[in-house]
Amino acid sequence: MRLLKELTEAKAVSGFEQEVHDIMHRELEMAGTKIVTDQLGSIFGEVNGTETSPRILIAGHLDEVGFMVNEITNNGYLRFTPIGGWWSQVLLSQRVSIVTQQRVFTGVIGSKPPHILTPEERKRVYSMKEMFIDVGAKSEEQVKEWGIRVGDPIVPICPFEIMPDGDTILAKALDNRMGCYVVIEVLKQLQKEKHPNTVIAGATVQEEVGLRGAATTPHVTEPDLAFAIDVGIAEDGPGGEQNHKARLGGGPLITFLDASMIPHRGLRDFVIDIAEKNQIPHQIEVMPGGGTDAGRFHMFKQGVPSIVIGVAARYIHSHVSMISKKDVEMTVKLLVKVIQALDLNQFKAL
């Protein structure tokens, strides 16, 4: 789990993905791939199998949700704006990193102690515009002397940890460093296995702010099929245990619908068939809100059969999230089996 720990603890909000980009570059080079990049920062490794086609794209995304400094107050506090989707209620009193050109500063999103809250204030949900970050400075001048500037990215803080059950992983940015980890593991396994196609595996930039890297990536990778590797929503908390929704430990999550795409039916049924033949447990997600990079991949040129495969995750788009290690391992296994079975004849038959 050292690689996943390194990936999740890296600081890379949308538009500032260099730290994770460098890790992916190192891992793709070590896997012996041909490196392919676009001009936004997405990065992929291309590996030829026994045949050159079909060309199969498997993609996570490098970025995580975070914030940006948009104001420094006279008395040295920072105002901020979100990068990606946030619910303001999860923010108060959380620690964050402010990443400047010279160093990283720790701050805390300030909140009032309950002792001084009025009854009305206790019931309020504060907007992000009212919040501030305290970095321990005394003035605007001191903040600027330290090198903090408007435009600097702000990243949540949460160390990586495996919980006592030995399976549950707790970390920040599992959306979507999990996807980055999975594509590297798939490449490592394909080094030991034959596959009748070309695999292009890596990760895009700026997924959390509008699937932007997914719009440019197909132009440099030219895929025939695409797999977006991403997390889905686990709904196995109190009150949700009996509703047959996605849960940790239930196997790979296959998305049948989201707000950005309905997957190619032939590809969807093929993936389900491979899972069943190999006795890989899997779960179905139908999510009317949200979307993934597959929402852009599938509209490239005349159309690219695409699907989303990933794992269920708790608490995403906050400082912390949870996934199952077993789900990750089964997702890698499923993708390897699918790629091994996807020759040109099977592609034409989808």
Image: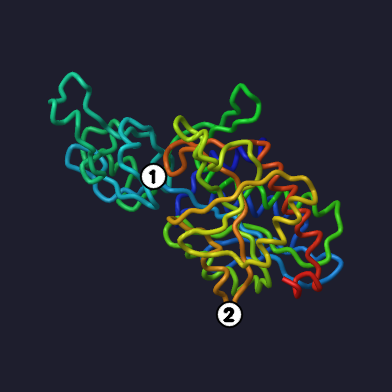
Which amino acid, mark 1? Ile
Q: Quadrant of the C terminus?
A: bottom right
At label 2, counting other C-alpha atoms closer than 10 Å, the crowd grade (few under 14, some 14-19, many 20 or more) is few
At label 1, counting other C-alpha atoms closer than 10 Å, the crowd grade (few under 14, some 14-19, many 20 or more) is many
How many numbered dots are placed on residues in this image?
2
Q: Nearer the viewer, residue 143 or 260?
A: 260
Q: Residue at image x 63%, y 24%? A: 165
Q: Quadrant of residue 47?
A: bottom right
Q: Residue at image x 66%, y 42%? A: 251
Q: Tell me: 1 left or right of 101.
A: right
Using the image, tell me which numbered label, if any, was put on residue 35. Answer: none
Contact (Cβ within 8 Å) of mark 2 with mark 1: no
Using the image, tell me which numbered label, if any, was put on residue 301. Answer: 2
Q: Tell me: 186 left or right of 164.
A: right
Q: Quadrant of residue 178?
A: top right
Where residue 100 sits: x, y (%)? Answer: 40, 46
Residue that lies at the very extreme toward the bottom in this rendered image: 302
Q: Which residue is mark 1?
A: 154
Q: Nearer the viewer, residue 246 or 219?
A: 246
